[in-house]
Amino acid sequence: MFLLLPPFILRQRWLLVFLAFLSVPTFAAMPAVATVSLDELRPGQRGQVWTVFRGTEPEPFDVEVTGVVRNALGPGKSLIVCQLTDPRVQNMGAVAGMSGSPLYIDGKLAGALSYQIQRFETVRYAGFTPAADLAEVRDKPDLTPAKIRVNPVTAHNPASADNSVNSTYTPLQPAFTLSGLSPAVVDLIAPHFAAFGLNATALGGSTLAAASVATASTPTAPLRAGSAIAVALATGDITIAGTGTVSRVDGRRITAFGHPMLALGDVELPLCAAEIVTILPSNLTSVKIANTGAIIGMITQDRLSAVSGTLGPGPAMTAVEVTVSPTSPTSRTLRFQVARHTQLTPALIAAGLTQAIVGSNDGALAQGFRITSNIAFSPTQTLTARTLHAGPQAFAQGLNQFVRSLAQDLQNPYVKIFPSSLRFTVEALTAHPAVNIDVFQLSRATVRAGETITATLAWRNFQGDAHREIITLSIDPNWAGKTLEIILAPGPALDDLTGRPAVIAAATLRSFDAYLAAMRDDRPRDGLCLAIVEKSALFSDETTSTPEIPGSIERIARGADEARFQKRDAVLPLLERHILPGKLVNVMIRRPLRVVD
């Protein structure tokens, strides 16, 4: 029996249906993906692989199944081997950026293009991750941010290995691009990324606006299996992303790449739209050149068999702003956001800061510059530091130390927290800050308690101009009978002599606020510290040190908590001055001083 409705009602119903269709986002629920199991595959079967050759529209190319290599990547992790019979692909082989391109046989998903079989081969083959392994990654539960734990061991991607004669299956690398970084900066920062298996190339670009934020966005074309996507590590004026291909779409859930990106496990990384500019064929490794587009979701799994995530809002990221103020009135600012990952974040931030300093046409920094950094964890929890650098070349040479120092500032063992923002101001100096010490001389090596002595400091600036300074030091009457020492050294060196650890162990502190307070307690990093010190055995409670406490108290305290309470030999400053501020000096001078009645 059919119900006949008046034309007016029909028109209204069709209008509602049409409006409802327009309101459905491009990642609306889709039919279940039919798959082919490994046992169903036979040599000689023909299939099609879908990928983007140019633009955003996927196209098919033909392959022929050669066979299945069982347990190729480990127990239960097999590879489907196919010959690339399409003339277009036979000439270039499997391409970096095709990672994840879905393989269909008889209309069913069999796997995803993922592994290079050989280089310089006369007939092109490729390895495909089976559909069941893709589903395994897709179905892994996503952890909430508070439950994500980052392995302190540096992640390693086998794709980074130099397999010039492939003796193993090599994952096709995503087409990593560094947009907004000059080639010189890419060369400087490459070793830091290589530790994570990220072999970056400066080829590629970004259509992301500098002020883009991690919000939900809809790609210009419907995202489907075979579409190009990018997984970003940084977005904005500096964009660092790996481009690959979508393997399957299950409603709002997407699975891609067919192999790990950086093998980081549980992650929160921006998922971006991508546009393929072209493919560069090569007998060694062909690669796609891509533009990274708007954020359209979040990758939550970076596993052996694939990456997987959800379309919609992007992850929380840390905003970075670098303002360079040269001697001219015009300043320039870089703005970008970086993914929150304990090991990766410092290198990502350093890349943007290095670009601001090294990768521009501004030569005003050649005389040296001061970097003021402000790290904000919350409105009341901040870290501020100032460092001097003797020009861009000196900064580049000390980049490793800068990254290590930044990593220490960002990491803490007390709470799961990342900075909400980092702001750097780079101020050009009018004169080169480096100086050389010619003379440091005391008026007397033996002095009576209550008297004064003078220290003469002679130094030359970068151009060789001579300078002299006389420093008067008062001798406290309570120092009578002591054999002391006068030390002239940079602040960090004196920190080390006074027993301040270079890395603060988690067990020595009890809260994140105590950690921030300890990080703020550094001596100045410019100029020199002139200190009168005595040798002592320091007993430390967290970061507070007490000299020469009674042994009974020490035994009781260390028995209660040996990790928290420590004893070590160090020097105890009795008087301290900061001299030559705004200068860079690398010297340590020690002079004995005896105080008599």
Image (cartoon, rainbow, N blue to C red):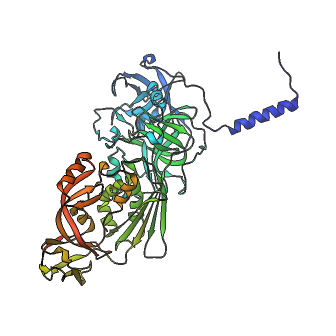
| Residue pictured at 83% horizontal, 33% vertical | 11
Residue 267 location (% of width, % of height)? 44, 41
| Residue pictured at 57% horizontal, 25% vertical | 32
Instruction: Looking at the picture, tell me which residue is in the foreground, 128 or 395.
Output: 395
Residue 372 drawn above or below residue 280: below
Residue 10 drawn above or below residue 548: above
Q: Quadrant of residue 497?
A: bottom left
| Residue pictured at 61% horizontal, 31% vertical | 29
Can residue 337 be seen by looking at this rendering? yes
Q: Quadrant of the N terminus?
A: top right
Can residue 590 be seen by looking at this rendering? no
Residue 565 location (% of width, % of height)? 25, 52
Q: Quadrant of residue 515?
A: bottom left
Residue 198 drawn above or below residue 212: above
Farthest-out residue, top: 1
Residue 552 location (% of width, % of height)? 19, 53
Instruction: Looking at the picture, tell me which residue is in the foreground, 351 or 69.
Output: 351
Q: Quadrant of the C terminus?
A: bottom left
Farthest-out residue, front: 552
| Residue pictured at 50% horizontal, 28% vertical | 48
Instruction: Looking at the picture, tell me which residue is in the foreground, 233 or 561.
Output: 561
How many numbered discs, if any? 0
Residue 419 location (% of width, % of height)? 45, 54
